[in-house]
Amino acid sequence: VETGFFHASWYLHRQDWIHGELQNQFDWFNQHLPIPGRVGRHFKRRSPIWGICWFHPDAKEAISRARYCAWLIEEGGLPVRSIRSARQREVLWRDAHQIVAKPTDDLPKAFG
């Protein structure tokens, strides 16, 4: 799956104002969202499956902040696109704000 905005922010460390704004947003995420308890599924005889993280549609504040982060990343010169899907996926973990789901073949792959 393509890289998320948390990972993309590491490429923007040379642009101080963008990096500072992103850090402010990440501080908010760290204060208000728990780290998912499960982001993968491991097996004895095959490669692990790593989940993809989505925001629950009712997590309006988190979604708004994520969109602001996406705008900052675009301002820094990295391409951004929003991925939406109505397709049901196998859920690995969830809380009131976030969903970690098993990826499916219809999702874009990073650098693929």
Image (cartoon, rainbow, N blue to C red):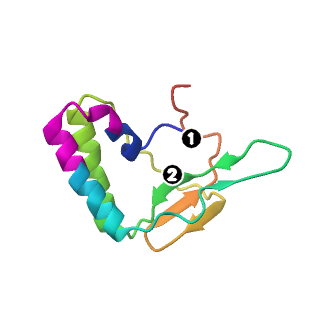
Residue 33 part of the magenta segment: no
Rendered image quadrant of residue 29: bottom left
* Residue range of the region highlighted in magenta in the rendering: 10-22
Task: State whether residue 104 is above or below residue 39.
Answer: above
What residue occupies the far bottom of the structure in this picture?
96
Q: Amino acid at mark 2?
A: Ser
**Residue at the (56%, 25%) spot, across then down:** 112
Q: Which tag is nearer the camera, tag 1 or tag 2? A: 1
Position of residue 95 relative to residue 17, above or below, is below
- Distance (Cα) linking label 1 and label 2: 9 Å
Residue 83, percent across and down? 44, 45
Q: Nearer the viewer, residue 91 or 42?
A: 42
Q: Residues within 10 Å of mark 1 (few under 14, many from 20)?
A: few
In front: 27, or 67? 27
Kindly identify the residue that appears in the image at 21 percent across and 30 percent down. Answer: 14
Could you tell me residue 45's position as x and y percent? 86, 45
- Please say if 56 is above or below 74: below
Left or right: 109 with respect to 102? Answer: left
Disc assigned to residue 85: 2
* Mark 2 surroundings: few (<14), some (14-19) or many (≥20) residues within 10 A: few
Label 2 near label 1: C-beta < 8 Å? Answer: yes
Q: Which residue is mark 1?
A: 107
Residue shown at the point (51%, 51%) measured from the top left: 85
Measured from the top left, where is residue 94 in percent x and y?
A: 55, 68
Quadrant in which the N terminus is drawn: top right
